[in-house]
Amino acid sequence: MRLDRAPPAAVYAANGWGDVLAMATKLKLTLACGDYEIVRALKEGAVEADGIELTMLTTLDSTTRHWRFLRNREFDVAEVSSSSYLVARDQGHPFEAIPVFLHRRFRHGFAFVNTSKGIKDPKDLIGRKVGVKSYQVSAVLWLRGILEHEYGVPHTAIDWYAEYDEDVEFTPPEGLRLTRLRDDQNCEDMLVSGELDAVLHADLIWPIVEKHPAVARLWPDYKAEEKRFFERTKIFPIMHVMGIKREIVEKHPWVPIELYKAFDAAKALGMKRMENPRVAPLVWYREAWEEQEELFGPDPWEYGLSERNRHTLETLVGYSHEQGLMKRKMTLEDLFIDVSQGRKRGGYRI
């Protein structure tokens, strides 16, 4: 068939070829994110982003995914470190973000100490050697900010030792004592041996998993401390945002809203499924679900720039700026694409 004589879309539709036409005209994008319950419907096809055909990659660990997106620009859309995204935007890298937050986590339970160093209180960290996965990682940015603002431990009063290089290169500000570990060194082993006094980490470290006697948590009852932190601040820390290459946004400005709608619909299905206590093999699962709902409300994982999310994100931007990762304090309007569709618009009435 000659292209200049191809039938119009109405002819395809009349002949039952509408699905073929729709598939042929969808925008193909790559999306890298974690394999979460709240994206299952998107991954399995129960939810689709209107006008978009997604190739989803969900097996990458977070550190690798962030590097490959921010350094190599391998994906069109990617779940990415909120801290590294702030640094990238501050430096003018060609990325945007939509307010979709697939990963949140309280961080008090990820501060670890060597049990022989006499560290019983957060202020005991002052003047100590503290290891981190990387200085820029979101979990560690949150912990540094929390230690400084909630417990009186200035980030400049600690000697920092970073194991990984950063997602985005930055120049350490004056007064920051930051040392990069050698390739043959790692934070966990150095904490066990006593070469480091403490470690702030994004993940559970092997000495805690294996109950090594040389390592304990800074806050033994970390859950109670996290609850007190939330009750005091109303912050449920956001770890990751949804990054998009700027060229995609500029060429297809409709894409961010359609992706946001798809992520929101997938989350709604995921949350509905997880209400069923038979889904998870946990003895008191339903009780934990009800405890969560009582403290956080029906949707702790809400997307968008709600008042609660704005407070959380503005706190993170403030931490990043005062710690010298960002040179300028950007607004949320600068950092996130507006996904509103107009007042009273965006419903399903046709």
Image: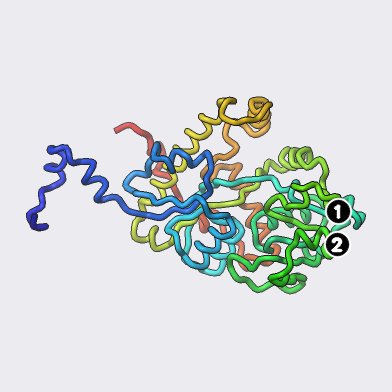
Considering only order in the chain, which callout, 1 or 2, is on the residue closer to the N terminus? 2
The spot of residue 40 in percent (x, y) is 47, 40
> What residue appears at the point 80 percent right and 63 percent down from the top-left corner?
190
Quarter assignment of residue 340? top left
The spot of residue 116 in percent (x, y) is 91, 56
Horizontal side of residue 268 vs 111, given as left or right: left
> Which mark identifies residue 194?
2
Assess disc 2: are there few (<14), some (14-19) or many (≥20) residues with their C-alpha within 10 Å of its C-alpha: some
Assess disc 1: are there few (<14), some (14-19) or many (≥20) residues with their C-alpha within 10 Å of its C-alpha: some
Horizontal side of residue 174 vs 72, given as left or right: right
What secondary structure is found at the residue carrying circle 2?
A: loop
Callout 2 touching callout 1 (CB < 8 Å): yes
Does the rendering let one see residue 327? yes
Does the rendering let one see residue 337? no
The spot of residue 96 in percent (x, y) is 47, 58
Residue pointed to by mark 1: 214
What secondary structure is found at the residue carrying circle 1?
A: loop
Residue flagged by tag 1: what amino acid is it?
Ala
